[in-house]
Amino acid sequence: MNKFKAIRAALSITAVVASVAAGSALATSAKAVVAQSHTDSPVPKDPGAEVYAKHCAICHGDQREGNLPGFPPLLGISHRMPNDKITELIHAGKGRMPGFPSVKDAELTSLLHFLTTGESAQTAAGVSTPGATLSKAGAQLFQQNCAFCHGRDAMGGETGPDLTQSKLVRKDRTGDEISKVIHEGRPDNKMPAFNFSDQETRGIIAFIREREAEAVAHPGGRRGVSVEDLQTGSAAAGKRYFEGAGGCTKCHSSTGDLAGIASRHEGLELEERMLFPPNVKNKVTVTLPTGQTVSGTLAYRDEFTIALKDANAVYRSWPADRVQYKVDAPVEAHVDLFPKYTDNDIHNLMAYLQTLR
Amino acid sequence: MKSLKSRFRLLLSLLLVCLAAVATTSAQDLEDAQLLHPKADSWPMYHGDYSGRRHVNFTQITPQNVSQLSLAWVFQTNQQAQIKSSPLLVDGVLYFTVPENIWAVDARSGHLIWHYHRPSPKGDHIGHRGVAMYKGWLYFTTPDCHLISLDAKDGKVRWDKLIADVDKGYWTTMAPLVVKGHVITGVSGDFDNLTGYLRSFDPDSGTVQWQWNATPPAGTPNATTGGMTWMTGTYDSELNLLYWGTGNPTPVLNGQTRPGVNLYTCSIVALNPDTGKLAWGFSVSPHDTHDWDAVETPVLVDGTFHGQPRKMLMQSSRNGYFFVLDRTNGKSLLTIPYGPVNWTTGIDKEGHPIPNVEKEPAPDGRLIAPDEGGLTNYRAPSFDPRTGLFIVSAHPSWSIYFAKPSDGAYGWAGADYGLWGKGVLEAIDYQTGKIRWSHELGEGGSGAGVMTTASGLTITGDAHGNMLVLDTSNGKTLWHAGTGSPIQSSPISYELDGRQYIVTSSGGLLFAWALPESRAHAQRH
């Protein structure tokens, strides 16, 4: 009984605090409107934000930041639940959360829109210090979703590369390429796709940029592999290995496919390519029960299905047990070499390849 | 409208009362006896039982009829996080998790009973292995290192305790193990130089009963930190010993500041579950510099070894070696690689691999097999007593490891890059370590664990997201189904209403498979 009263009292205090806070938030957004009033049209007020302020802000915070552990933040709610689930929660409530069955039709639509697209906390605060706030929001998302593989400081961790030294990150000044990788993932490298909003993606990119700047500002004490680290071998010994024990000349030529390789790739990237070239397309020839053969680029293979892209780039697949097929994958010679290499062989080969400019 | 609603409410509360009545009478049964001898219609802990063998005694689904295996139901979490947990099954209800979330689902129909979500802005969200249960209460670990006890009936929180300090760099993902009134939890966190430990909580009050530290406190001169305890262990009630694998030392790739074997990192340890006192420890990777946590299931097997009856412990370790120990004293019976390894100069007379100093990470790189993910990882292996096969989803792989003085001696302290890997299911003869059969699982590798059945089936998944049912005697595929995403959990099985179910997951989906009802009935008679 007493406990219940205490909770009610706490709630009403929270309500007062929240309405004060909401007042200041309104003031902030009013300022934002003033600041932007030189533009042609005034900034329209988001009707969803009003619905939110009326029903939800008292518990979930006026910036949707929540108040843990009791009241969950609603920022990024769209990653956690679909719209129908959110609607169900709004209408039926959950635990101590009351239901709001009266929120429906246009009001509901605008609230859902606000909840799943607008990112008022970051945007509103962004008016004063856009970069810092954006990267701070991004930092939290990065720690939750990216840090395990890419390291907490984005400088590489378990399995994921150092993003501060990533070519893609460096070249992509608009963020479009990074955003693409975040949203589509890199299935070949086991990176999953992430369903972040544009604002969240910008936050993550801002965090990566901050780490990149930090890394450039403090060279030396960092992880990673520099070109200078990979200069311990003998080019002459590497050439002998290339032409002899390594068997590299069965497929490669220093004046053919590898001519100028060191001008195109360097350092760790060159070494990784040398040890196992990424994304090599293999050939496959499929013999159908009729005796007809189809050749193309291997597109998929498991125990049960074989698929290729034919000469017209059309995808075709067959049950693996109904056809005969032969895969031509010369890249597998690289796998056969792994148990044969000494570390010196690798360093020597690397020295030799670096002479092919 | 209103009357409809109130009628619905009445119905709901009646239903809840009924459910509560059933749950209180039967969930209370999940006492020590049930944990020691799980019933056919239960999967009451992460590994299904205390042995960690992931072998079930069911014979309804057989090599002869598995071609009829079909979908009973699918549950959709509607979330992006991949399911990496093993569900528990108690009294017809499945409980499973992803980080921040628990679902309670009807094991017969796959419909949602309740869903618990607790946002955890701090802490790594890399994965979650599942809940533990004791009597009518669930135990759940969070990314920010809380242990939360909830009512299994409705997911209401009873208490919330701290396992570790997230701000120091710990996080938690593991399913606790309940042993005789102890809720035993471990920790994760090798981005910082931190001590790994196990902490035992009172199941009712949540007070800490004991803590066992794997390594000395950070800052101890010439000592290692690390030894995280992020996978659920096993338990032998006769010996009253708890078996647990510990993680890698820190700094991870730089071993300079931590000379010696680095006990008890990368080790298998035996502890008294009542006191947390160490009975024995066995170093699986002495002085590890490749991040090869030895947390893979310590599988307990009673049987003969070279003609002599033994209480054994087997582990297919991330470092590429298969170990058989006498679990009464931790003495080695067998140490042998089960795939390509190139980082040792041999095995010492106590059965420990001898690390090759030339293969420690270096400024110009060292070629290492296996890669950092290891020859296997948290996915569970299975032991099949009938064939004596220890079956593990292996990952033959190669990588390059770097470390230089400027990488320092904190946290990762180096860099490593995977070059190539694939998945192969290996069936190991535990007496000799010889591979009896192999089954290719595809490029890259598979995250799926393994379960075997008494009828001679081996259940796992391949690199592409196919669920596979193989013949345990020869590794040949008997049945498969594409599930749309690579499987990242280990299968479980139970029997309800006389029907055997196999539950697997992929992506955010949980699948229940069974024979068609008519077949299941015919099989019973």
Image (tube, rainbow, N blue to C red):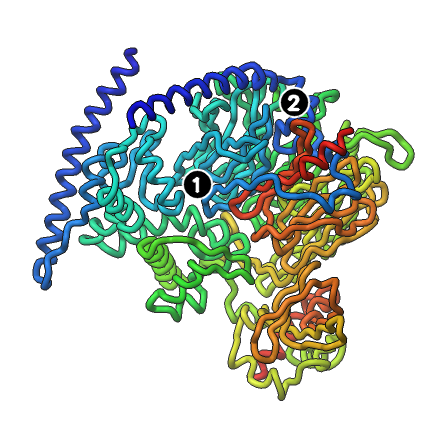
Measure the C-alpha gap from mark 1 to mark 2. Answer: 31 Å
Which quadrant is the C terminus of chain B positioned in?
top right
Q: Position of residue A325 (x, y in %)?
A: 73, 70
Residue at 34% in and 68% down: A173
**Badge 1 local density, few (<14 within 10 Å), some, or many (20+)?**
many
Is residue B58 toward the left or the right of residue B213 in the image?
A: right
Residue at the disc numbered 2: B35
Residue at the disc numbered 1: B123
Front-lying residue, B239 or B299: B299
Q: Name the residue type under label 1.
A: Gly
SS at mark 1 in the image:
loop
Kindly give the residue lying farthest to the bottom in the view shown: A255
Q: Are marks 1 and 2 on the same chain?
A: yes
Residue at 50% in and 48% down: B411
Q: Can residue A149 be seen in the rendering of this structure?
A: yes
Say above or below: A258 vs B521: below
SS at mark 2 in the image:
helix
Q: Position of residue A237 (x, y in %)?
A: 69, 78
Kindly give the residue lying farthest to the top in the view shown: A1
Q: Which mark is residue A57?
A: none
Q: Chain of mark 2?
A: B
Front-lying residue, A22 or A129: A22
Say above or below: A346 vs B413: below
Front-lying residue, B255 or A275: A275
Q: Position of residue B21 (x, y in %)?
A: 51, 15
**Badge 2 local density, few (<14 within 10 Å), some, or many (20+)?**
many
Residue at 44% in and 32% down: B116
Kindly give the residue lying farthest to the right in the view shown: B307
Mark earlier in primary sequence (1, 2): 2
Q: Position of residue B40 (x, y in %)?
A: 69, 26
Please tell me in which quadrant of the rendered image residue B27 appears.
top right
